[in-house]
Image: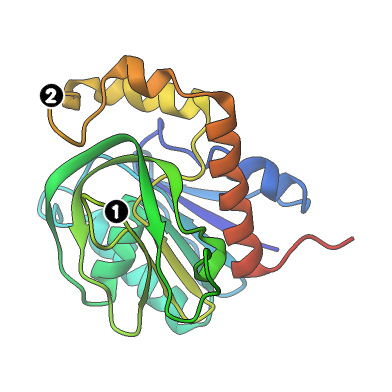
Amino acid sequence: MRVQVLQHVPFEDIGAMAPWLAARGVIPDYTRFYEDGLLPPVAGIDLVIVMGGPMSVNDEAQLPWLRDEKQFLREAIAHGVRVLGVCLGAQLIADALGARVFPNAAKEIGWFPIHGVSEDAPPGEACCGFPAESLVFHWHGETFDLPPGAVRLARSAACENQAFRIGRQVVGLQFHLETTAESAAAILDHCRDELVPAPWIQTEAAIRGVDAAVYAEANRLMGRILDDLVGPASP
């Protein structure tokens, strides 16, 4: 399996997705937009993972590489490549497919629950492995309308569109299931100035104080979503 990671800042990497890939013998390739930002041809790629970052998808005037990234995502989706977007990555997918990305009514920063939604799901569970409620890590100030053909998978009290799916090919997550204690610390180190008192912004102590089991459960859900998107590991 050939995997291309689109990384926007050095402190937002794939976290707990790394061992998931390693278990399948995969060493991902990277496009690092904070370095050269070179994008490969779409042909031959099996999975694109689009990571987060503090910029907005609407910052094309300041960050012209956003146009190239969105075009790359459109081409990848048109060619049947599986695509997973995390936070900014989900917003980029939505924008690339013609949906609006705009400031949410409130910033969500910290560990807050999301609620899985799906009309076709059995009681207590939503499509794509989402349980009725999950405690997940957020760090976003913008949100998106659902792109054409997308189905909402999760919402939260502060943000209606938390996750979506387009067929069995594309998944967008507004939150961070890949988060580890180390990756959360890295975001805090670079973005702690955003931790201002607000209803949906936790303190640094609260963010750092979650139990290891919370990370483990979020990471398990990340693995289930990846399994559902590209298939489980071979025996």
* Label 1 Cα neighbours within 10 Å, binned few <14 / some 14-19 / many ≥20: some
Q: Whole-percent x and y of residue 112?
A: 34, 40
Q: Quadrant of the C terminus?
A: bottom right
**Left or right of residue 6, residue 66 in this image:** left
**Marker disc for residue 156:** 1
Q: Whole-percent x and y of residue 211?
A: 53, 23
**Left or right of residue 42, residue 19 in this image:** right
Q: Which residue is mark 2?
A: 197
Q: Quadrant of residue 99?
A: bottom left
For badge 2, the amino acid type reads: Pro
Looking at the image, which residue is at 34% across and 14% down? 205
For this orientation, the residue located farthest to the front is 123
Q: Secondary structure at mark 1?
A: loop
Q: Is residue 41 visible?
A: no
Looking at the image, which residue is at 53% across and 33% down? 214
**Looking at this view, is 187 or 81 the one in front?**
187
**Marker disc for residue 171:** none
Looking at the image, which residue is at 31% across and 42% down? 53
Q: Whole-percent x and y of residue 14?
A: 52, 42
Q: Secondary structure at mark 2?
A: loop
For badge 1, the amino acid type reads: Ser
Q: Quadrant of residue 16?
A: top right
Mark toward the start of the polypeptide (1 vs 2):
1
Q: Is residue 105 visible?
A: yes
Vertical relation: 41 (above or below) 199: below
Q: Whole-percent x and y of residue 39?
A: 43, 59
* Label 2 Cα neighbours within 10 Å, binned few <14 / some 14-19 / many ≥20: few
Q: Quadrant of the N terminus?
A: bottom right
**Left or right of residue 200, residue 36 in this image:** right
**Looking at this view, is 235 or 157 the one in front?**
157
